[in-house]
Image: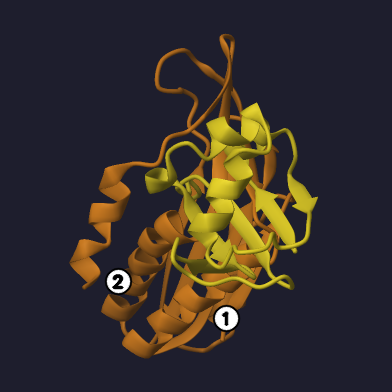
Chain colours: A orange, B yellow
Amino acid sequence: MGRVIVTEDDFDIGKEMDSLKQSGVGAIASFVGIVRDYAEGPSLIAMTLEHYEGMTEQEISNIIDIACDRWPLADVTVIHRIGRLLPHDNIVFVGTASAHREAAFESAHFIMDYLKTKAPFWKQEETEQGASWVDARETDDTALEKWR
Amino acid sequence: MKIRYFAWMREHTGVSSEDMRLPDGIETVGQLADYLKHTSEGHSIALRNMKTVRVAINRQYAQLDSTISDSDEVAFFPPVTGG
């Protein structure tokens, strides 16, 4: 179930929410990740996202399947952008639709936490001092603990 | 078989993908990594700390002791940082 899109193109948050509404249930929760305008030190010029085509989509689908086993979901949309993005650009959209708000909130949170540690994307930050790969954070791994 | 590298590992090896025959006597991802380390200086840098490297066989997460065959696509990459 659900829609998984990996694309260089921007997405329209309103349109995605409308699409989730079509499931006819009473609750939709969403998360949008955007490019911040600061790096670890100097100001950020751009962020480039690389991914492992095929595996990325499969991993996100697996995460959605696990979420669907755990919560009563009517629909799920995950969109993740790749390529070169600028500060304030959208990076990721996760939307979940359910008859119950707890299920919608919790499953969106769960999908984001899993996506951050499992989906094969890599960020490279570009600043005036050059380009550098973003290090994975231990806090992303520990974020998974609460779902065990 | 096909070997894939991503992010800074790709930059060190200088290639995003390479085709080769599975070398004789190599049965696991870990053994393949040890073999590849000796193919260039860049490969040895990319694969020097396998504790921090993630691996996949045919686009599914695998372990260093997972067995491989000549028809597999094996990928090496750093911990992921999407979202």
Q: Which mark is residue A106?
A: 2
Is B28 or A115 nearer to us in this picture?
B28
Q: Residue lying farthest right?
A: B19
Q: Are marks 1 and 2 on the same chain?
A: yes
Estimate the x, y position of residue A42 in percent, counting from the top left. 46, 12
Q: Which residue is mark 1?
A: A2
Estimate the x, y position of residue B16 in percent, counting from the top left. 73, 44
Residue A26 seen anywhere in this rendered image of the structure: no
Residue A124 seen anywhere in this rendered image of the structure: yes
Q: Chain of mark 2?
A: A
User: Which residue type carries mark 1?
Assistant: Gly
Estimate the x, y position of residue A90 in percent, counting from the top left. 58, 45
User: Which residue type carries mark 2?
Assistant: Glu
CA separation in Å, label 1 and label 2: 16 Å
Residue drawn at x 38%, y 89% is A69
Residue drawn at x 60%, y 71% is B68
Q: Chain of mark 1?
A: A
State which quadrant residue B19 falls in: bottom right
Estimate the x, y position of residue B4 in percent, counting from the top left. 68, 52
Q: Which mark is residue A23?
A: none
SS under mark 1: loop
